[in-house]
Amino acid sequence: MAVTAIWPIKGRVDKVIDYVRNPEKTTEAGLPELASLHAVDDVVEYAADEMKTERRSYVSCLNCREDTAAAQFMETKRLWGKPGGRVCYHGYQSFKADEITAATAHEIGVRLAEELWGGRFEVVVATHCNTGHYHNHFVINSVSWADGKKFYNSPADYARMREVSDRLCREYAISVIENPSRQTKNYAEWQAERDGKPTHRGAIRADIDRAIRASTTERDFLRVLGEMGYQVKTHGKDGKPLKYPALKPPDAKGYFRFHKLGEGYTLEEIRGRILRNIHKQAPFPETVHCLPRRYRTRGKPRPKVTGLRALYFRYCYELHIIVKQPASVKRVSFLLREDIARLDRLDAETRFLGKHHISTMEELTAHREQSSAEVETLTSQRQELRKELRRRSRQGDTMAAGEVKQRISALSGRIRAARKEVVLCDGIAQRSGQVRENLGRLVKQKELERKEQSNDELFRRRGRASREDVAGNR
């Protein structure tokens, strides 16, 4: 089973090639981020590194030589007058663990490169053997030596890469993903769902599930979504049904297509789920709870929290990070749900304010200056210790050098903690204004809801109309 990917690189060609051969770089999981920071020589250096390729036994080059690949890449660009922009492309082909040998993996990688790019581009192919599974790296020049045209990696080109890779895997009796998923997730969303953290699409799916439970027809479903504040777009301006229906959450900037929300959330699948309902359920059932008991306390009452701490505590209550009383999920507006995706940062900032009893912006600024000064002082001390470590190492005093290393490690830990506090202070100073604005909008929204409920109740009393229960039954 082979997984493939490819992405463009900007910067210097030699840096990208070196990156692929550099033994200190990470494995393929972090390549897209690191590759954007380095350039071609780094990438080729990473791919052909002896530690990763079993002493360079599995490095092959098409239309170039390994030791001069970066120079040849740049020479081709200069020859055709296209030295700027995307300097190369970096791709990989990863195989399932314990399913293939390094030699076979490299052979498949070379055949893949020859079929896709060998007739027009310079390519470096390297098979890495340093992880639990073998995987090939490809470094492809962005300009063709044959005709001077730019390498263009369209969705169709990537589909072709996956198709050829699957065909070669079948030839070598290697498993293939027969039915790949229709939807893909970005890494941040996948990681958040893996760690059990809420996401934007997760919140939308939850609201759709509630609307489905409260509906027996599609009209009911659209009505309930509208009551939640969603806008649903199923037809274009010409009145024709849209190919990709979408919905827009309240306070969101754009629309989300139904078919990209995941399995079971296309409009057709939602209609099928609605038709299976026999009874309507309340989309937002209120949790019944008892009032907390009040206790008399001896001594002085605890001072009331004010300022920045009160602001963050209130925000955490609204996001249900801190639960004061059981409440309906309806009370968390989509406006605030955007910050649910940043729970770790918000939680760290709230704990920081409470730990240091910071209530005003002046106290926050003073704490930041103190932490910054501590970072500078500790950094100077660490520099002196590093000089001492070099002296001890030259003298061959192993025991003393070990003690100095421990002191350096302790200082590094304190520096990291102080720098983290500086970052938290900057984040609070930057976000506190937006938090106030969000809470202000939330208060206005709740006031409007209360007025609408009061008007509806008054209208029902005057008209003496019978009320339906939340399930729609009289």
Image (spheres, grey):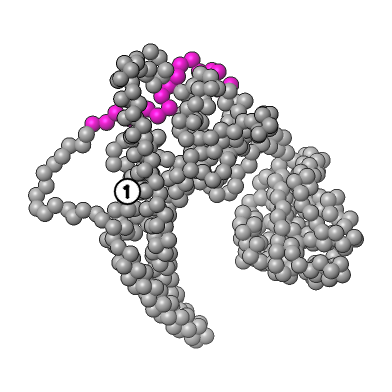
Residue beneath the point at 72% across and 53% down: 6
Residue beneath the point at 60% across and 47% down: 186
The amino acid at mark 1 is Arg
Image x and y of residue 416, in percent:
43, 67
Image quadrant holding the C terminus, namely top left
Q: Is residue 14 left or right of residue 434?
A: right
Residue 18 in view, yes or no: no
Query: Residue farthest to the left?
Result: 298
Chief secondary structure of the magenta span?
A: loop
Query: Residue farthest to the top?
Result: 474
- Vertically, is 445 above or below 385? above
Image label count? 1
Q: Which residue is mark 1?
A: 314
Q: Is residue 469 left or right of residue 118?
A: left
Residue 82 in view, yes or no: yes
Image x and y of residue 206, in percent:
48, 34
- Between 188 and 204, the residue placed more toward the observer is 204
Image x and y of residue 16, in percent:
71, 66
Q: Is residue 467 left or right of residue 199?
A: left
- Vertically, is 57 above or below 320? below
Residue beneath the point at 87% across and 70% down: 79
Q: Quadrant of residue 33?
A: bottom right
Query: Residue farthest to the front?
Result: 462
Local SS, label 1: helix
Residue beneath the point at 49% across and 86% down: 391
Image x and y of residue 215, in percent:
49, 21
Residue 280 magenta: yes
Mark 1 surroundings within 10 Å by alpha-carbon count, few (fewer than 14), some (14 through 19), many (20 or more): some
Magenta-colored span = 272-290
- Between 405 and 260, the residue placed more toward the observer is 260
